[in-house]
Image (cartoon, rainbow, N blue to C red):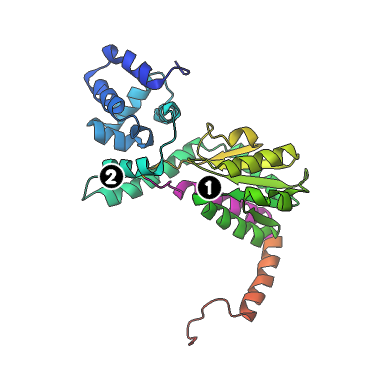
Amino acid sequence: MKTQNIYRHMANKLPEMSKAFKKIAHYILENTTVVPFLNVAALAKKADVSEATVVRFASFLGYSGYSEMQTHMQNSIQKQLTTTERLKMTADVYNDQEQWFYNIFRDDIENIKSTIEQVDIGKFHQAVHILEEAQNIYIAANRSAAALGIFLQYYLHIILGKSEIVRSVENLSEQLYNLGEKDVVIGISFPRYTNSTIQTLAFAREKGSKTICITDSLLSPLIQHADIPLTASSQMPSFIDSFTAPLSLINALIISVGKERMDEARSRLDQMEATWDRFNVFYLRGDQS
């Protein structure tokens, strides 16, 4: 069953379903491009059943839970939705004039919950360790994920003083020509995955460097090129990705590295504070221009 198309499997099981399960199945089969991005609460509301019924439905189909079923639904989509298609999906899902604002926050909360439940804490600690020991850290993050990469690089540079952004594939030769075993390359990408990030991670692996990826699931094309995969849910039925959970994961990574390198980070920050004061970088209450 796990290798079978989930929608075909669902249709074949219809005769065995209860009335409530059939309501869920019919809604899913009629909305195959929307449902893979809905959380349990949203699907339950759309199908007019309880959240517990949705969870039982996933078990009935042979999955360990809704999260696994959702992953298979996403994998069954023949192509990743274009931005235009996702824009239309936004209007279809967030169509309640009174509730759509709050539903966006609830979807972000669900992404954080899902990330916490699925995190591989052992892999997380491995990532912290190799970042501490790295000679140089390079971060590949493009398009919308660039914001996550800039945030991560900024704080790793403050703590460790040895991180930089790989701006594009065109810059690979200049920035990464001397990659070695003591270097670490982090690739950050979410659907629709960027080829440049995948290529950067693959190149780093070929050069013998340690590689970390931050992505949405173990089905991501970055996974095969990563020594340490870290996943965070980014699901949102919209034309944008939700980066709330990925940013929380990055926050945890930064804080963990900072805790392990407390003395070094404190010394570096003291020097930076003196420089910031010298150039009057930050606003001080009472200052007048």
Q: Is residue 257 magenta?
A: yes
Which of the pair 264/106 is nearer the observer? Answer: 106
Magenta part mainly helix, strand or loop?
A: helix
Q: Mark 1: which secondary structure?
A: helix
Q: Is residue 65 above or below residue 183?
A: above
Q: Is residue 69 above or below residue 233?
A: above
Q: Residue furthest front?
A: 170
Q: Which residue is denoted by mark 2 in the rendering? A: 91
Q: Amino acid at mark 2?
A: Ala
Q: CA distance from mark 1 to mark 2?
A: 29 Å
Q: Position of residue 252 (x, y in %)?
A: 55, 50
Which of the pair 171/65 is nearer the observer? Answer: 171
Which is closer to the viewer, label 1 or label 2? 2
Does residue 97 appear in this view? yes
Q: Is residue 289 magenta?
A: no
User: Between disc 1 and disc 2, whose residue precedes?
Assistant: 2
Q: Which residues are the magenta region?
A: 239-262
Find out whether the residues at labels 1 and 2 contact each other: C-beta distance under 8 Å.
no
Q: Amino acid at mark 1?
A: Leu
Q: Mark 2: which secondary structure?
A: helix
Q: Which residue is denoted by mark 1 in the rendering? A: 249
Q: Please give left or right for residue 251 compared with residue 237 in the image.
A: right
Q: Position of residue 136 (x, y in %)?
A: 73, 52
Q: Is residue 264 above or below residue 170?
A: below
Which of the pair 95/21 is nearer the observer? Answer: 95
Query: How many numbered badges does the structure rendering display?
Result: 2
Q: Position of residue 177 (x, y in %)?
A: 76, 48
- Label 1: how many Cα within 10 Å (few below 14, some 14–19, many 20+): many
